[in-house]
Structures are given as structure tokens and as C-alpha cells.
Amino acid sequence: MITRLTFASRLGLIVVLSLIVAWIGSTAIFYIATGREDGESRPLPLPRQIAAIVQLLEQAKDSNERSLIIRAVSSQKFSVKLVSALPLLQTPEARPFELRARLLQKALGEIGGRPFSLTFDAQGGHDKRPPQFSYLSPTDLELRVRLSTGETLIIQGYHRPTTNVYGMPIGFIAGLVGTLTGLIALIIMHRQTRPLARLAARVDQIDFSGLPTQLPETRSAAPEIRQLIGAFNRLQSRLAQLLRARMAMLGGISHDVRTFATRLRLRVDHIPEGLDRERAIADIDDMIHLLDDALLASRAGAGELVEELVEFGQVVRAEVDDRSAEQAHVHLRSAARHEEAVVLGDRLALRRVVANLIDNALQYGKAAHVQVDATDKSVCLTVDDEGPGIPPEQRDAMLEPFVRLETSRNRRTGGAGLGLAVVRSLVEAHGGVVNISDAPTGGARFTVSLPLFHA
Amino acid sequence: MRANANLLIVEDDPVIRQLVADLMRREGFDVEAAEDARGMDDALARRRPDLIVLDLMLPGEDGLSICRRLRAQSNLPILMLTAKSDEVDRVVGLEMGADDYLVKPFGPRELLARVRALLRRGGSTPAVARERRFSFGAFVIDLDARELVDQSKTPVALTAAEFDLLACFVQHPRRVLTREQILSWTRGRMADPFDRTVDMQISRLRRKLDAASPSAKLITTVRNGGYLFTAHVGQVS
């Protein structure tokens, strides 16, 4: 699945994931730090401060002095109250409380010891969670200390999340700016990789048989990408040149060989009539057949085939009829509607595919049972013979050039071994598939399926 | 068949020319030979043959163009010799004007049979210039009058460029044409291969054809920017 991601989305994913990791990380650090603070002193005053407050309040002469002390020690973070005869509460047995209670005990012990209780804010009472989760969201604490005067000192610590001047948590704006920067970087990065996507699209479209299409060197692209495009353009012209040269050479060879073959064919008639003359004529025919095969296969490889609408079933019928006229054992089974199946391809190449398969079946399998079937998406040609069949391990090799089932390259028993390779290269050039299997008649079965044309 | 029918052989390979000439002379024909278009014109100026055996691949003016030129002037039977088997389809096409063809290498007997058959027909090809009117789908196009009519015989208004494009499609039906091919056929060698106006003209032409005959989908775009004219084109008189 990862292989399907484009370069841009991979980079995007990396950026988004690292932003998420950064946020999670900083939040975790924030809470761990807050949690540690919670366990120490805040939001209550330090134990010794509390002890000092207790002493001050107990030593105060009148209520006026007490209210002064209370005002002095109150702050944004905790409210201090003095109430007469309020009962103490049960200190929960949980880590933050125990630790604090121990420290308080020690601090109050220095001034003679006072009974106290440490709980969640009883009045607020909003937090019903077990205290170990108070790390995640520290809640208000309430400390009650019984003074020697009989009154109860209540110190409530409010948890205030750390905020900045705008009232937002510290780091929020930094995170926001970071995210926005990341997104902008992502967009810019995407723009940077777009020339690569365009390059790939254009490379796919290149048709070496036509004029080389130069890929545009976008000025805004990175120098490396411009270099890549330039290099690709040069490679393309070199390849096109090479292909043109090869096709020209093949065309030249083909023309000249045909010229020589024509001379030879005309001269052969001077040989006295008989077996030699027949054989000489057959040799010339084989030679030209081989030449045509090779030329066609190389054109298919170079993408030089013509593309036209071809009624495949009619091509098959024509080839079968030609051979039936020569009393060959060829039989065609095909429904009329299958003959209407239209394929986009080179008529000559398709004719050669059918001809080679039928001739192959006749030569090695004594007979050819030909069938054409069409489905919604493809048309399928099946050629069965009555020969010995082809062992499964040799089937792939059969479709390679110059491989024949017989090891001897005796001309009398067959061609040069190019026929099936030509079939394969032509069929594949048409986006089709060739398969070899066993025929129900016991011989070999060749199956060719070609995609149908849809307007 | 007349005795001593007069043949003109146009073939650039001296050996084949000689072999064919010798063969035909042995068979009792009167044979002249030329190696290219110029030699052929000289021979034609001296005497009008009964049949021309013409090679497709010639130095200078090629057989295809010679064939069209001869056809424009006369109904002289032409037997075309081709070296490439894949040329055959085009050679026998409507436009070529050759009366028969033979793929190299050919045997003496095949050649004689074709020559005799053509002579027997004796230039029976109609001398009138071929009508260049074709029907496709619901339309009829007249390439000479430059007119396109729909099924109700109403003319469809096309610009000159659109008509040229349609003419190009009608003459190469059911075949994928690349932008480069269309350009070189409609505008000749001066075409700029990066010219994208063809795509726009084709989409305008397509709209006009669709408007006159909806759901016909005559022009299809195929991968790699090629165009395909899907209709069967028939000649009408």
C-alpha cells in the first residue's frame, strides 16, 4: 500500500506525522512536569508556609489582625478562610496526598503538631475520579487545619492552567504557527514535486514511432528536476534515433533480400521441372516468411504497428478458408456474433498471429481445431491440434525466439522457431495474452485473448 | 488476347528488369523497360504500351505517385510490384488506381497469369474520374464539391479546416491517426508538430457531427492522443 503513495503525499505524511508526534510529545512533557509540581507543593503553599500561617493566626491579637494575615496570604492560587468549628475530613490514602500529608505533618510537628485533613475540594466536589488520575487534570485541593484556638483554617488551592497574556495555554500559538508553517511547507513541497508527476505522465505517453515530444523544462522546478527533464529529453532523442536507424536498417535488409529472392525465384524456373525446383521454390517462400516474421516482430517491439479497427473473427475465418481451400485439416467453430468482435490493432499482424498458430498446429499436430469466442471485454482464439502435446515445463520456452520442441534444427521438420515468438510479441503488443495448455483432443492448445475495442 | 501485346516494365533493379523482360519476350510479348519515372515517361512518349508493370519502390518519384499520375491521364492497365507485404493493403486501396498487384518474390507463372488476365480485361477500368463521394453513418461527404450533408440532405456547415480534417478521417477510416499524421495529411510538410489547434478543431468537428447525428460517436479519442474514425465508409455514386 505504501508503494502507491506519491512522492508528495509521502512527504506530506512525514510532515503531518512529525507534527503530531511533536504535539503529543510536548503535551506529555507538560503533563509530566505539571504532575511533578502537583506532587510537591502546588497548588497549596509550602508546608512550612502553612505552619507559619498557623502560628501567625494563633498568635494574632484580634480578628482585625487575623483578617489582615488572611488577606496577606491569600492569592490567585489559593483562598484562605477561618471558620469556627468545622469538622476535619478523612485524608484519602493516595500517593499525592500521602506525600503532602507527611510533609505537612513534619512542618506542623515543628510547631507542636495540629490535626489536619487534606482532600479534594469538598464544596466543589466535582471530581469523582480516583486521585491517581489527578495527574492528567490537577483538581482543587482543600486543606483543613484545626488551630489551637479551636477554629478551623481552610486553605483551598485552585488549579489554574498556565496561560499566556491572551488567556490561551502557553505553547498554543507556537503549535498553531508550527502547524500552519508545516501546511504551507507541504503545499510548496507539492508544487515542487508536481514537475516529477508531469514528467512521469509524459514519459508514459512517449511514442517512439512518432516525432520525439520534448518535455517542457519548467523554470520554477528545482535544478535537479530540470536536469532530470533535460537528461530525459536527450535520452528520448537518442532512443528515437536508435529505433529509427534500426527500423531503417531492417527495412533496407528486407527490401534487398526481397530483391535477391525475386531474382532467384525468376531464375529457379530455369531449373528443369522436378523435385529440386519445388524445393528451391519452397525454400525461397520460407526465407521470405521468416523475414516477414522478423520484420513484423521488430515493428511490434518498436510500437510501429498500425492501429485500426479489425473484425478479429473475420480475420480468423479468412485464414481458415485459405487453408481449407488447400485441403488442410482445419476446422472452425465460431458463432456469428463472435465474428463481429472488433479489436483495435494491426490487421496484418493479427493475420500473422492466426496464420502462425494454425500453421504451427498443422505442422506439428496434424490438424487445427480453431475456435473464436467473445466476452464483454475480450475475444479469445483457441487453436487445438492432434499432436503429442507440449510438456508443461517447456511451454514458456516455446514462446521464446528460436526455441523448438525438437532439438534438431532440421529445416525439413519445421521453421526457424520464430513463429510462436512472433505470435507472442504481436499479441503482447496488442495488449493480449498467449497461453499453452492441453487440448481435450490430447494435443496442444494455444489460446490467444485480445482486448475488445470499446468506443 | 492480341498477339505481340506491348508491355512496359518499370523496375529499378537491373537484374529483375532483365529477367522479367527476357521472360516476357520468350512468352511472345513486345517488351520495353525503364528504370525510373523519367525513363518511363520517355518510353510512353515513344509508344503507348498495352500494360505497365510498375515497381512500387523506385528512386525519385515512387510507384504510388506514378500510378496516380497515370490514372489521372489514362485507363492504361497497371500491374504493381511491391516489396513489402504490408503495403499490399494500401496498394489495393481505392485511391491507388493499380489494377492488380504482385508481392515480391513472385514466380514467372504468377506474373504471366496476372499480365494475361489484365490484358484480357483490356483497360476495362472506367475512364471517368472516380467519384469522391463517401457515406458514413448518417452523412454523405463529397470531397470534390467540399460538401457534407446529413440524412435529411441538409448541408452541415463546416469551416475549411474542419472539412479537411473530416476528409482526412473519411479517407483513413477505422484507423488510429496520431496528431502528427493528421497534421501532415491536412497541412503537408509545413506542419508544426506541437500545434494543438488540431485538437480544438477536432473537438469542434465532433460537436458539429454530434449535433447533426446524436449518439453516433464518430470520432473517438484513444490513448496517447490518437484519434479514431469509427464509422464504416462506403463509396457512393
Image: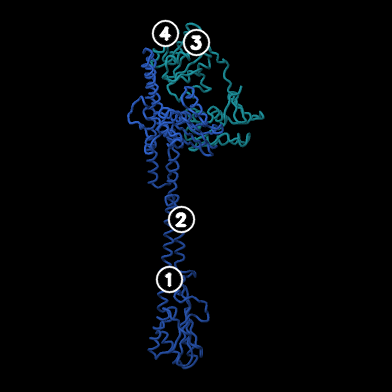
Q: Residues within 10 Å of mark 1 (few under 14, many from 20)?
A: some
Q: Is residue B131 left or right of residue A113?
A: right
Subunit that carries the residue with mark 3: B
Q: Which chain is cyan?
A: B
Instruction: Tell me whether the residue at label 1 lies in contact with that at label 2, contact meaning CB atoms closer than 8 angstroms.
Output: no
The hue used for chain A is blue
* Furthest residue toward top: B3
Q: For the residues marked 2 and 3, what is the alpha-carbon distance in whole angstroms? A: 82 Å
Q: Tag 2's secondary structure?
A: helix
Whether callout 2 and callout 3 share a subunit is answered no
Q: Which residue is mark 1?
A: A31
- Label 1 or label 2, whichever lies nearer to me, is 1
Q: Residues within 10 Å of mark 3 (few under 14, many from 20)?
A: some
Q: Amino acid at mark 3?
A: Asp
Q: Amino acid at mark 2?
A: Ile
Measured from the top left, where is residue B185 in percent x and y?
50, 28
Residue A325 position (above or below residue A307): above
Mark nearer the N terminus (3 vs 4): 4
Q: Which residue is mark 4?
A: B26
Q: For the residues marked 1 and 4, what is the alpha-carbon distance in whole angstroms? A: 112 Å
- Label 3 or label 4, whichever lies nearer to me, is 4
Front-most of residues A448 and B70: A448
Q: Which residue is mark 2?
A: A184
